[in-house]
Image (tube, rainbow, N blue to C red):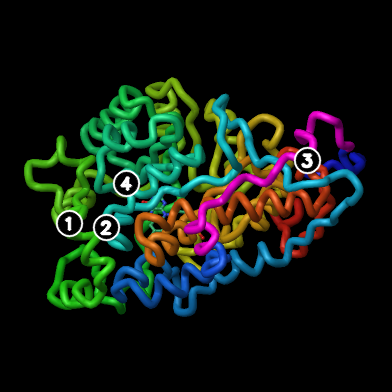
Amino acid sequence: MPDETTSSPQITPDHYPANAPPEPISAEKLALKRRYPTSFDLRARAKRRLPNFAFEYIDGGAGAADTGINRNWAALDAVEMLPRYGNVIAPPPTDIELFGQPYSAPIGIAPIGGPGTGFPGAETYFARAAQAAKIPYTLGMLSAITIEQAAQIAPDVLWLQLYRFARNEHKIGLDLVRRAGDAGVKVLMLTCDTPVRTTRPRETKSGIVNPFKLTNRLRMDALSSLPWFLSLMRNGIPRFVNLRPYMDTDPSMEAAAKFMRTEGGGAFTWDEIARYRDHWNGPMVLKGVMHPDDAERVVSLGLDGMVVTNHGGRQIDALPASVDVLPSIAAAVGEKSTIILDSGIRSGVDVARALALGADVALSGKAFLWSLGALGGRGPEHMIDLFKDDLAATLGQLGCLAPAELRTVKTRHPGAYTADEL
Ligand SMILES: Cc1cc2nc3c(=O)[nH]c(=O)nc-3n(C[C@H](O)[C@H](O)[C@H](O)COP(=O)(O)O)c2cc1C
């Protein structure tokens, strides 16, 4: 939580090398910054370039009118931050340390299941860009590259997200945990924010059905987009390869969807979370905390952190914006746990808002997917640049010399849940 009594931080001589020249920037990067200066410019291009089902899969939310997605954006937009001037002379560095590891900025790529539907090869492109920029990349368990392959591409920054596989005493889930440890995964993330399967109308209307089936309509739609189709040729048809050792058929999306229904489903219970804690020695976080009492429980089970999230507005559209419950969660456990925020993060300003309200780091899902749809494999690198440049500028504008100083910024947050409401 922002500290009411702290005054604006003072500059010291070692904050900047004297008159450091600006970092050189390539002509290609400059052109991208001029043509696509925000994530919404990437979104518009992705909409034009992707097959309809792919865009609807990555962009659509729960409910008839994406109210949950819009609420996340509106809630972030409503958060104001009060600047203090007189101590910043250049955009400050954005580096942070998280779970004892250095990262170049407090922004990471959120776990995405089946991102190859949005753009084939997505996992490889995400992993490469995150490793090059040194930001966290959370591989979704439902991925088209294995944990081991991802760890080779992104050895310094790989996190892994797990859904629940409860059959046979969690044999599969615990084996995935073992593989993650052997592969050197930095952080294990258990997902709790999807206890049930809900409907995303835009996805359904685009022809994606549950259980998944590759229909002629989807095939025709895929052929309508040259960039998407070429990336499919280059990277192959996405298969849920992490599950291959446990399935007796090829892990096609159809077969894997059926397999998931018999083996998995539901969200981890508190007892199960405690059990996974015993099997994982590294940092472990729970994804899907929206109430301070749940946050306290995460801490009491010995987890290292939590993701405050409403699953990006994709579950039901009546959930609060995650940023609106963040301050009460930060007040409850901010001193003793690492708080990660996602849902609606589109810019470095949004990242700054999250940190000013008590988060240690923010994740983004859709913005990174839009970047792939717009620019293919070059997209994630550009999106990371946008996040970092915008965050550095925001820090400078607010009078902060480092991301940690955002906690000292005074905020006005009209949508915040109060203690009485929780
Ligand atoms: C296409 C798509 C697929 C997703 N799949 C998963 C998943 O498999 N596991 C998971 O924990 N979260 C999943 N998420 C949720 C994200 O991890 C994250 O919570 C959300 O995208 C954040 O909101 P934002 O998209 O507004 O940034 C998915 C999100 C999207 C957009």
Task: Compute the Cα span from label 1 to label 2.
Answer: 7 Å
Report the residue marked by disc 4.
Answer: 124
Q: Residue 278 lies in what quarter of the image?
A: top left
Q: Is residue 349 left or right of residue 341?
A: right
Question: Which residue is pictured at 73% across the width and 54% down the height?
Answer: 394
Task: Compute the Cα span from label 1 to label 4.
Answer: 14 Å
Report the residue marked by disc 1.
Answer: 237
Question: Which residue is pictured at 63% across the width and 37% down the height?
Answer: 95
Q: Which mark is residue 213?
A: none
Q: Secondary structure at mark 2?
A: loop
Q: Is residue 138 visible?
A: yes
Q: Residue 12 lies in what quarter of the image?
A: top right
Q: Secondary structure at mark 3?
A: loop
Q: Are marks 1 and 2 in contact (CB under 8 Å)?
A: yes
Task: Compute the Cα span from label 3 to label 2.
Answer: 44 Å
Q: Is residue 90 left or right of residue 152?
A: right
Task: Compute the Cα span from label 3 to label 4.
Answer: 38 Å
Q: Earlier in the sequence, mark 3 or mark 4?
A: 3
Q: Amino acid at mark 4?
A: Thr
Q: Residues within 10 Å of mark 4 (few under 14, many from 20)?
A: many
Quarter containing the N terminus: top right
Q: Earlier in the sequence, mark 3 or mark 2?
A: 3
Q: Quadrant of ligand 1?
A: bottom left
Report the residue marked by disc 2.
Answer: 120
Q: Which mark is residue 19?
A: 3
Q: Amino acid at mark 3?
A: Asn
